[in-house]
Image (tube, rainbow, N blue to C red):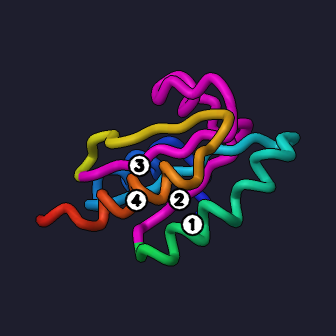
């Protein structure tokens, strides 16, 4: 999973990737750090581009993407948000949504 360091780089990733998983975490969030490997494994399993951000490092993203808590997982398809989970990640539902994302015909 690629780490993004600026809001412009994040927008570039969202705009240039057909399918993207965005994982948002914060510095002192133990749940964020515990869930990160699971989300990363799903991205690798289904071969979906993925990026992560530390919300403390990119506060502009919090306002622009309505991120009020962490962790947050957002699935994008062609620059459009397809699915979002925040705080408590349901990994069965997330995997189902990632499967849907990968099955969409271009």
Disc on res. 21 = none
Question: Which residue appears at 49% of the width and 77% of the height?
Answer: 45
Mark found first going from the N terminus, 1 or 3: 1
Disc on res. 2 = 1
Q: For the residues marked 3 and 4, what is the alpha-carbon distance in whole angstroms?
A: 8 Å
| Picture coordinates of residue 4, whole percent (x, y) | 57, 55
Tag 1 and tag 4, C-beta contact below 8 Å: no
Tag 1 and tag 3, C-beta contact below 8 Å: no
Q: For the residues marked 3 and 2, what is the alpha-carbon distance in whole angstroms?
A: 11 Å
Q: For the residues marked 2 and 4, what is the alpha-carbon distance in whole angstroms?
A: 14 Å
Mark found first going from the N terminus, 3 or 4: 3
Q: Depth check: 10 or 68 in front?
A: 68
Disc on res. 75 = 3
Of badges 3 and 4, the one in the foreground is 4
| Picture coordinates of residue 13, whole percent (x, y) | 39, 56
Q: Quadrant of the N terminus?
A: bottom right
Q: Is residue 32 left or right of residue 86?
A: right
Q: For the residues marked 2 and 1, what is the alpha-carbon distance in whole angstroms?
A: 5 Å
| Picture coordinates of residue 39, whole percent (x, y) | 60, 60
Q: Is residue 44 magenta?
A: no
Q: Quadrant of the C terminus?
A: bottom left
Query: Secondary structure beneath disc 1?
Result: strand
Q: Depth check: 45 or 28 in front?
A: 45
Tag 3 and tag 4, C-beta contact below 8 Å: yes
Question: Which residue appears at 58% of the width and 53% of the height?
Answer: 91
Tag 2 and tag 1, C-beta contact below 8 Å: yes
Bounds of the magenta segment: 48-77
Report which residue position mark 4 lands on: 98
Q: For the residues marked 1 and 4, what is the alpha-carbon distance in whole angstroms?
A: 18 Å
Mark found first going from the N terminus, 1 or 4: 1
Report which residue position mark 2 lands on: 51
């Amino acid at each position: 999973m690629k780490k993004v360091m600026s809001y412009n780089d994040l927008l570039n990733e969202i705009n240039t990737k057909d399918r993207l998983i965005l994982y948002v975490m914060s510095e002192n969030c133990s749940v964020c750090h515990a869930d990160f490997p699971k989300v990363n494994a799903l991205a690798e399993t289904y071969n979906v581009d993925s990026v992560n951000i530390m919300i403390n490092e990119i506060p502009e993203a919090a306002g622009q993407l309505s991120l009020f808590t962490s962790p947050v997982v957002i699935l994008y398809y062609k620059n459009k948000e397809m699915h979002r989970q925040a705080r408590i990640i349901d990994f069965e539902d997330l995997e189902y949504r990632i499967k849907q994302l990968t099955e969409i015909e271009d």
